[in-house]
Amino acid sequence: MTQPSTTPVSLTRFLIEEQRAGRVSADLRLLIEVVARACKTISIAVGKGALGGVLGDAGTGNIQGEAQKKLDVIANDVLLEANAWGGHLAGLASEEMDHSMPIPDVYPRGNFLLLFDPLDGSSNIDVNVSVGTIFSVLRCPEGVVTPADEHFLQPGTAQVAAGYCVYGPQTTLVLTVGHGTHAFTLDREVGSFVLTTRGMRVPEETKEFAVNASNQRFWEPPMQRYVGDMLLGKEGPRGKDFNMRWIASMVADVHRIMTRGGIFSYPLDSKCAPKGGKLRLMYEANPMSFLVEQAGGAASTGRQRMMDVQPTGLHQRVPVFLGSKAEVEAAVRYHAEHDAAH
Ligand SMILES: O=P(O)(O)OC[C@H]1O[C@](O)(COP(=O)(O)O)[C@@H](O)[C@@H]1O
Ligand SMILES: [Mg+2]
Ligand SMILES: [Mg+2]
């Protein structure tokens, strides 16, 4: 009798099997391979740390008024270089670039649009805490040869793939092409991503929340009440004790939630309200929402399903609540009750 193969399933083999099953096109498969290769390169750069001279500030700023770290710039360059020549894109957009970039017609071109946060959690780079890369893939609208910013402004439901790579004690790539969410761990000796969790599931209930509590005095009333009730624990209206975690790298916080459940929130507060929130819709909130929903979780602005938001700007910001379904629904309920009473 033939024994089932115990050979590890590489990302390449996984994607070829997905293609054979009709769940991913050849073009999208190859695009994902290019992004994964770029993540491997970024992982190596992150791992060099002080030895590689990659820590510290770049001395420049991005369009969002944030000081860029050297690794923000390095990661952006790696993703740009790899994908501009990858042959599967019509255009790309990045947190670190003011505007989207159409692929010049002297380069090989394709029909997808790629958006990325090249290095997420920049404040953690210099202190050797997990950082990551987040990406989202959209289709270039039909008939558009030279995509501009407006062609990227598609809701999260239009994403054809999304993923993140966390550079932590392990380098892990988490991916969806709309048929479940799967995790691949980088085998550093072999140099390839190996399937380590097929069909990740975010537990529906949780007793763990993630929020930057230093912003508490700036939160809206429904958020004050929501967190206040969690802090009351067993004796309060929620009837259970909650634990709290905050890494300040969205990738690392979301990866914990993908693995063991929880709710991640970066709510509206009076500091970030003029901008609409802190986190960016197109290359942070939407790809994470796609991954979380594909793993059975939920993602909301507190008032609307995240992936239904119609984007109005490439660098648009939104409030974010995502993770365990029942807990996201609880957060939404607090907002709805407040709004109904005012
Ligand atoms: O420092 P704060 O206000 O807690 O914000 C942390 C959040 O900001 C971010 O770092 C923003 O990402 P970038 O590093 O890509 O700008 C998220 O990863 C994280 O969740
Ligand atoms: Mg980020
Ligand atoms: Mg970033």
Image (spheres, helix red, strand yellow):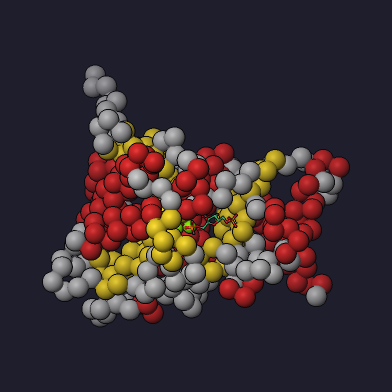
Q: Is residue 206 left or right of residue 105?
A: right
- Quarter of the image with the C terminus is bottom right
Q: Residue at x 75, y 53 (%)?
A: 227
Q: Residue at x 38, y 54 (%)?
A: 70
- Marks counted in the figure total 0
Residue 281 visible to an observer of this rendering: no
Residue 66 position, x and y percent, is: 49, 64
In front: 62, or 270? Answer: 62
Residue 168 position, x and y percent, is: 44, 39
- In the image, residue 213 above or below residue 96: above
- In the image, residue 130 above or below residue 150: above
In front: 216, or 224? Answer: 216
State which quadrant residue 149 falls in. bottom left
Q: Residue at x 29, y 25 (%)?
A: 6
- Quarter of the image with the N terminus is top left
- Work out which residue is located at the far top of the displayed protein and give it: 1
In front: 167, or 48? Answer: 48
Q: Is residue 68 left or right of residue 34?
A: right
Residue 337 position, x and y percent, is: 77, 66
